[in-house]
Image (cartoon, rainbow, N blue to C red):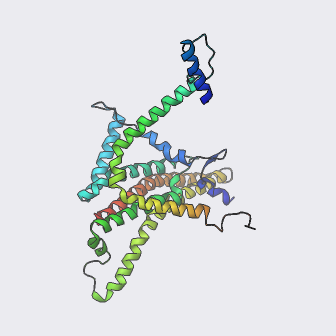
Amino acid sequence: MTLSFFDQFMSPTYLGIPLIAVALTLPWILFPTPSARWLNNRLITLQGWFINRFTQQLLLPLNLGGHKWAALLTSLMLFLITLNMLGLLPYTFTPTTQLSLNMGLAVPLWLATVIIGMRNQPTAALGHLLPEGTPVPLIPVLIIIETISLFIRPLALGVRLTANLTAGHLLIQLIATAAFVLLPLMPTVAILTSIVLFLLTLLEIAVAMIQAYVFVLLLSLYLQENV
Amino acid sequence: MCILLSLCLLQKKKTGIPAHSATHHKLFSLESDLLRTGHHILKMAGRVFSSWWAKMSPYYTGAYQEMWVGLGVMTYLYYKVSYGGKKAVKGKPAH
């Protein structure tokens, strides 16, 4: 019984064909392309408004050099939020519960920000390793600590997203199983468990959106330091 | 295939009748619907790719150059994790 709770995180295959590529590319069809007309329909207008507003807000603290990353950050946000939200549907696979995917997103993007910093402004990039106003005796220790925190960043980015989503999905499955099993035995307790399940599902919807946003926001902050 | 093609051309030259006319049996024909559809699909895919590349090439070649380093690192790490090194591969000993 314990093993079956983790079956939902297994990469889906059908007759031996891995379906992970389908799981990753299918959300793309949910975003219609704006037509060549001057005025689109309401759905596309809403989509375009959301994308523009989000990009505008995200790029506010960034210098001009960071604006090249607008397309990447916005598309990453849409990608993550769609995968997370679709994963909340019953019996769907959430690719962002896989550490491999999240590390595959976090490491190259973080490394790119570090390389940009080292390439364009190496002094300022290295200067971030020592905060202003540090007492002199603490300088060596603090440089070591800041270096460790720099290298922990991609790990934290990837693991944060994975852990939040995995934990949420596991909790939902556990509580749903409990409510289902309790229904013939203790219906009142089962109803209370179902209420908890409903509230948890609302929380997971919020977590799905927030975690996607936090991932992209932190990347923009790392970029802001290096640009 | 070359022999068949040259035979068709030879037929065309000798008699003046087109090799694909109704009175001639086709030795080899390139006019099947499946091949034509496949050809159209490939051309369409090429157009889609070139229109996408026309918009995205400044990003991939200029703005996101630093990304390729991380991508290479991750690909190498994934290869190492999935397939391991020489010793991890099962196989018969050399002798």
| Quadrant position of the C terminus of chain B in the picture | bottom right
Q: Which residue lies at the image location 57% right of the left edge and 58% below the top edge?
A: A170
Q: Is residue A123 above or below residue B77?
A: below
| Quadrant position of the N terminus of chain B in the picture | top right
Residue B19 shows in this picture: no
Q: Is residue B39 above or below residue A226?
A: above
Q: Residue furthest right?
A: B95
Q: Residue furthest front?
A: B14
Q: Is residue A80 above or below residue A146?
A: above
Q: Is residue B37 above or below residue A172?
A: above
In this view, the residue in front, A86 or A36, is: A36
Q: Quadrant of residue B49?
A: top left
- Residue A4 position, x and y percent, is 66, 56
Residue A14 shows in this picture: yes
- Residue A84 position, x and y percent, is 47, 51
Q: Decide if residue A1 is on the left or right side of residue A20.
A: right
* Total number of numbered discs in the rendering: 0
Q: Residue furthest bottom?
A: A137
- Residue A185 position, x and y percent, is 68, 53
Q: Which residue lies at the image location 57% right of the left edge and 23% below the top edge?
A: B32
Q: Which residue lies at the image location 42% right of the left edge and 53% below the top edge?
A: A209
- Residue A47 position, x and y percent, is 35, 41
In this view, the residue in front, B48 or A192, is: B48
In this view, the residue in front, A1 or A11, is: A11
Q: Which residue lies at the image location 32% right of the left edge and 49% below the top edge?
A: B58
